[in-house]
């Protein structure tokens, strides 16, 4: 057994039977703290072990071992404490993929402050809302970026007009240069005693269905839920490189750029690009022999359009995808070219990984896989009845049974108006608002959000199915399918389509697309309206806006 596995097994037990994760249990949790009990412990027993391999936008490499990670995060903790930041203070972080993010995140949680990762694309209205809702004490960003300019515009309109402003890679009279100032502080840090595992560790913002930003609050136990994510879904191996493509402002970055890899003994590979280029990512995989990868479906599609055959991808042993439904055509094409079947995964900002195509369990292409044993997953009918295992193909809402206990990794919203906790737990069940069904093998198949199914002429139509069909047309770069009101049919299907540069949108092309859908799937599913657009609107986390 590896020494760092010993560290993790102080807190987690797993039982594997016939290649299946049969049981997961946790122990020694009362005072658990990820930074002190995992990162710093590994730094003590294996200080030269590489935690992060970082490639900046200029392709400059920086290798960070656990000793450096511990020391730099300690300095950050001492620096922030000297600025008056203390336990319970919220701090917004917008750092893209800069390596300082990891020092800052760990440094903040070491003093009990609450990091709130956000994306750098936020504009003044978004920034103002997040500062006010979280009552943020400080904000951290990259020097000279638009995010700073947008923040400066609204700072005097915020509830807290004295919010501290920090930046990396430079500073001015308004923005304190962290890189320069934190060097003055000690690498030594005394572990605080006034914390417990149920303290707030970090917060994520999610828009929900209303569009109003809400805070998702996670405690100090949350990271442990991602041991399964890293080891059994991403299949991260000791000291091997794992690339999760996500910006650090997205919740997915914490799954695959922080908790999952480090709990699994792997090394986080970071490429701080400004624009996603498939050929660039493929070159990185080839050059650094990256072992495991995770990215959303759109980015896999871009890889497949980047002369993928030119690159040696033999180092890849596992590829995963989450964030949107993964079309079968992407899975099949990627498999033909690499021999790797992309593994679906499903979870939410409020949870850890709920359901996944675990590598050592067989499930049919397109399924999202089997439940993570940390959670008691069920499917619920509209009537509130639980769908039994015999009711194969019956569609229901994915729910988590919380009647006996709230599982590790499950959080709650913090209401915007009254600032008090609320949640989606109703009568002992956490409601995801996502629909799925089970097949004969017990694997789950994702249908869509409860509020995105299109009801047309008596049919219930899953927009993801039609998008998957449209994706087979090479000249369609991206698409979104949704329902629009129709007096006769209730709703009709509309498709917004982004064409490749060489294709011109015409009425003839619309008919060609409609005919293709009619002959590929059930004819009633074809889009009666098609609009050619320049871009598909997405949320800050890269998901298609469907409302």
Image (cartoon, rainbow, N blue to C red):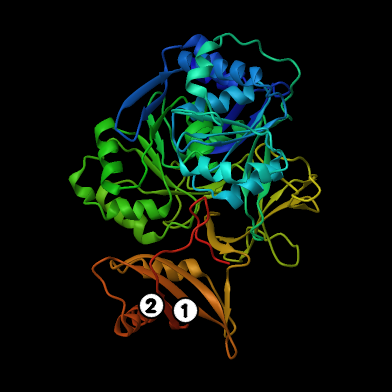
Q: Position of residue 444 (x, y in %)?
A: 54, 56
Which numbered disc covers residue 517?
2
Q: Quadrant of residue 74?
A: top right
Quadrant of the rendering where the C terminus is positioned: bottom right
Looking at the picture, how far across and down is residue 526, in whole percent?
A: 43, 80
Q: Secondary structure at mark 1?
A: helix
Query: 286 and 378: which one is in front?
Result: 286
Quarter-of-image position of residue 140: top right
The relative height of residue 68 versus residue 273 in the rendered view (above or below) is above
Q: Please give the name of the residue rendered at 39% of the width and 81% of the height, measured from the top-left corner.
A: 518
- Can the viewer see residue 22 in this picture? yes
Q: Give the total number of marks visible in the rendering.
A: 2
Q: Is residue 102 above or below residue 17?
A: above
> What's the residue at 50%, 17% (across, down)?
72
* Mark number, residue 346: none
Residue at the front extreme of this rendering: 173
Q: Position of residue 77 (x, y in %)?
A: 60, 19
Drawn side of residue 202 relative to residue 277, left or right: right
Pick whichever, 227 or 273, lies toward us: 273
Give the distance between the C-alpha atoms of the residues marked 1 and 2, in whole angstroms.
7 Å
Mark 2: few/some/many CA within 10 Å (<14, 14-19, 20+): many
Q: Tell me, yes or no, whether the two marked residues, 1 and 2, touch with CB atoms within 8 Å.
A: yes
Note whether residue 348 is visible.
Answer: no
Query: Which of disc 2 and disc 1 is earlier in sequence?
Result: 2
Mark 1 burial class by Cα count in 10 Å: few <14, some 14-19, many 20+: many
Furthest-bottom residue in this view: 488
Indicate left or right for 532 with 404 as reference. Answer: left
Check disc 1 and report the residue beneath it: 525
Helix, strand or loop status at disc 2: helix
- Residue 306, compared with residue 439, is above or below; it is above
């Amino acid at each position: 057994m590896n020494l760092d596995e010993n560290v993790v097994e102080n807190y987690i037990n797993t039982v594997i039977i016939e290649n299946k994760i049969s049981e997961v249990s946790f122990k020694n949790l009362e005072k658990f703290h990820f930074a002190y009990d995992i990162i710093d412990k590994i730094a003590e027993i294996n200080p030269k072990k590489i935690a992060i391999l970082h490639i900046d936008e200029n392709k400059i490499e920086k290798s960070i071992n656990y000793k450096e990670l511990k020391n730099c995060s300690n300095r950050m903790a001492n620096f922030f404490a000297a600025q008056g930041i203390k336990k319970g203070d919220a701090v917004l972080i917008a750092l893209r993929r800069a390596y300082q993010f990891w020092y800052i995140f760990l440094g903040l949680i070491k003093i009990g402050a609450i990091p709130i990762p956000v994306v750098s694309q936020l504009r003044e209205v978004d920034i103002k809302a997040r500062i006010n809702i979280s009552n943020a004490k400080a904000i951290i960003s990259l020097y000279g970026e638009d995010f700073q300019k947008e923040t400066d515009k609204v700072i005097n309109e915020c509830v807290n007009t004295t919010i501290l402003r920090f930046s990396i890679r430079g500073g001015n009279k308004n923005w304190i240069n962290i890189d320069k100032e934190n060097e003055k502080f000690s690498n030594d840090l005394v572990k605080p005693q006034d914390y417990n595992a149920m303290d707030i560790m970090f917060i994520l913002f999610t828009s929900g269905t209303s569009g109003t930003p809400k805070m998702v609050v996670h405690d100090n136990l949350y990271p442990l839920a991602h041991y399964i994510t890293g080891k059994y879904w991403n299949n991260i191996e000791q000291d091997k490189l794992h690339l999760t493509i996500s910006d650090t402002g997205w919740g997915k970055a914490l799954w695959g750029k922080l908790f999952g890899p480090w709990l699994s003994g792997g090394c986080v590979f970071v490429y701080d690009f400004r624009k996603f280029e498939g050929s660039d990512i493929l070159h990185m995989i080839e050059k650094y022999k990256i072992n495991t990868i995770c990215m959303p479906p759109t980015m896999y599609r871009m890889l497949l359009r980047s002369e993928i055959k030119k690159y040696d991808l033999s180092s890849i042993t596992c590829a995963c995808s989450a964030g949107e439904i993964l079309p079968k055509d992407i899975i099949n094409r990627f498999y033909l070219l690499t021999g790797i079947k992309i593994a679906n995964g499903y979870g939410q900002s409020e949870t850890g990984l709920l359901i996944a195509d675990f590598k050592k369990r067989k499930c049919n292409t397109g399924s999202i896989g089997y439940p993570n044993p940390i959670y008691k997953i069920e499917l619920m009918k509209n009537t509130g009845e639980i769908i039994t295992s015999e009711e194969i193909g019956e569609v229901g809402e994915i729910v988590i049974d919380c009647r006996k206990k709230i599982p590790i990794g499950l959080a709650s919203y913090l209401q915007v108006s009254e600032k008090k906790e609320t949640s989606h737990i109703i009568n002992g069940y956490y409601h995801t608002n996502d629909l799925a069904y089970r097949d004969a093998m017990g694997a789950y198949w994702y249908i869509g959000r409860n509020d995105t199914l299109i009801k047309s002429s008596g049919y219930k139509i899953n927009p993801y199915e039609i998008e998957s069909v449209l994706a087979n047309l090479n000249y369609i770069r991206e698409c979104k399918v949704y329902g629009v009101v129709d007096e006769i049919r209730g709703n009709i299907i509309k498709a917004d389509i982004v064409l490749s540069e060489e294709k011109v949108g015409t009425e003839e092309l619309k008919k060609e697309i409609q005919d293709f859908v009619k002959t590929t799937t059930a004819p009633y599913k074809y889009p009666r309206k098609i609009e050619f657009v320049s871009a598909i609107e997405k949320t800050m986390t890269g998901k298609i806006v469907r409302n």
